Amino acid sequence: MVKIISWLLLSLLSSGGLVAYFLQQQYEEKSADFRILYRDVTIKLAQHDAIIRLLPANPLAWEVQKLFPHIIRLRQHSTIEPWRALVVGRKGQYWLNIDNQSLLIDLNRLVSDIRGKKRFSHLIIQWNNVPLFEQGAASPRDYWRWQKAISSRSQPFMLIADDRPDWMGLPWTAILAPALFWGLLVYLFSQYRSNKRRRDIADMRSQYAELTRLNTMGELAAGIIHELNQPLTAILSYNQTAQRMMRQQHPGQVSALLEAAVVQIKRIDALLQQFRQKLIGQQADYQPIVLGRLWAQVVTLLDKEISSKKIRVSSRIPDNLPLLYAPPLWIEQILHNIAHNAVQAQEGNKPGTSWINLTAKAANAGILLRVTDGGPGLSEQALQQVFMPFFTTRSNGIGLGMALTETLIQRLNGNIQVSNMTGQGGASFTIWLPVHLREE
């Protein structure tokens, strides 16, 4: 719409300017015609003064009429001199009286002889504001007017001419040509702006991709620190315990500790592979998830913390639960982060009062997971900011666990909500994931 309005305004301005220029040219040409007409009329009227003084005792007076056909009659007064210099006749005629001589002059013939093809739409010769001669009819469209007094003592007339522009005679091809020019210019300018905008957007996207890559690398570094801290701590604890058992001559328990350490090492390897996939943009491996088995693996990973704090872990997962397609490590990481937070939230509980529960059910073409715990629940601030990066309620926490959890759920086209359980205390994390999500 802006392009059309711009084109119309530019076309109207340029075409209007050309119309004004060509109309001015017409006016100048008409003005030149009027000056020629005025000169010729003045010469003809001046001739009358010379002729009338040569008439007495001239036997060739008839030849005067032949040379000047607008002089209709010649008359001589023998006794009384006419008391008026001009006597208006009829139909554009008047008597010119000088001394004892009189001429009857027809302005119709006079003007027709000198105008030729230069015609005005309305022409008047006035004397004392009385029209002696009028040709054409006045029109409201005649907004050009020229008038000038004829400097003659015997015939002090006023010559007036009116005319109108010749619209059909204007060079409309030249007048309308700028519309094509401005249309082409507006089109080229819009194409330039469109191409420039595309280039700017491409540059912005390139810069954004670079910034996103840098931010992702920072997120990955922080995520690696967060995710690897717990399994590395567990591995250290298992190895230290195994060393102590070997020194105490109890080799039978070393095997179980080493197996637990191997599980944690495998988890570290899986986490590093996941971070590598995210860094290079590699597609994740979507597989059918056996939720009960995966939850048992999460509990195994947290076995040390769960055992040391005597936390009771339970679950209710129906056997007919729809099959969920997702990267197994993503679901494990989601449940691990929530369960790990639940463990840490119950550090101040009395022995035997801590618990974590997982329930699952089909809902809205997906699976609804709910993880609850026996902790004190979340504060109002924590409920609002729990998924914000670097928000944590622990002095030694990084604040990336729940932010990464939300990111993974969103990548699975799911959603997560958090609340406190009414009357029981403790936090409740509700996750919904579509069951048929499969990345091709």
Image (tube, grey):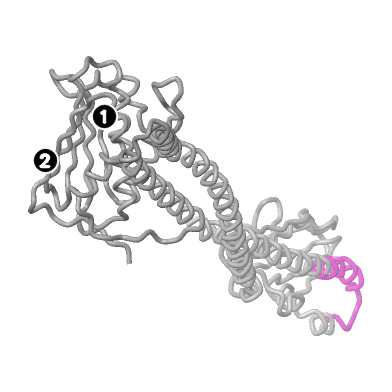
Crowdedness of circle 1 by 10 Å Cα count: few (<14), some, many (20+)? Answer: few
Q: Residue at x 56, y 65 (%)?
A: 137
Confirm whether residue 81 shows in the render: no
Q: Residue at x 41, y 25 (%)?
A: 392
Where residue 171 appears, x then y in whole percent?
65, 75
The boundaries of the magenta stretch are 40-61
Sequence-wise, the earlier of marks 1 and 2 is 1
Q: Amino acid at mark 1?
A: Ser
Q: Is residue 111 above or below residue 190?
A: below
Q: Amino acid at mark 2?
A: Arg
Q: Nearer the viewer, mark 1 or mark 2?
A: 1
Which residue does the numbered mark 2 point to in the structure image? 316
Which residue does the numbered mark 1 point to in the structure image? 307
For label 1, the SS is helix
Confirm whether residue 283 shows in the render: yes
The picture quadrant where one finds residue 302 is top left
Mark 1–mark 2 distance (CA, rounded to whole Å) = 21 Å
Where residue 184 appears, x then y in whole percent?
61, 70
Question: Relative to 77, is 298 on the left or the right?
Answer: left
Is-magenta flag for residue 87?
Answer: no
Q: Is residue 368 above or below residue 397?
A: below
For label 2, the SS is strand
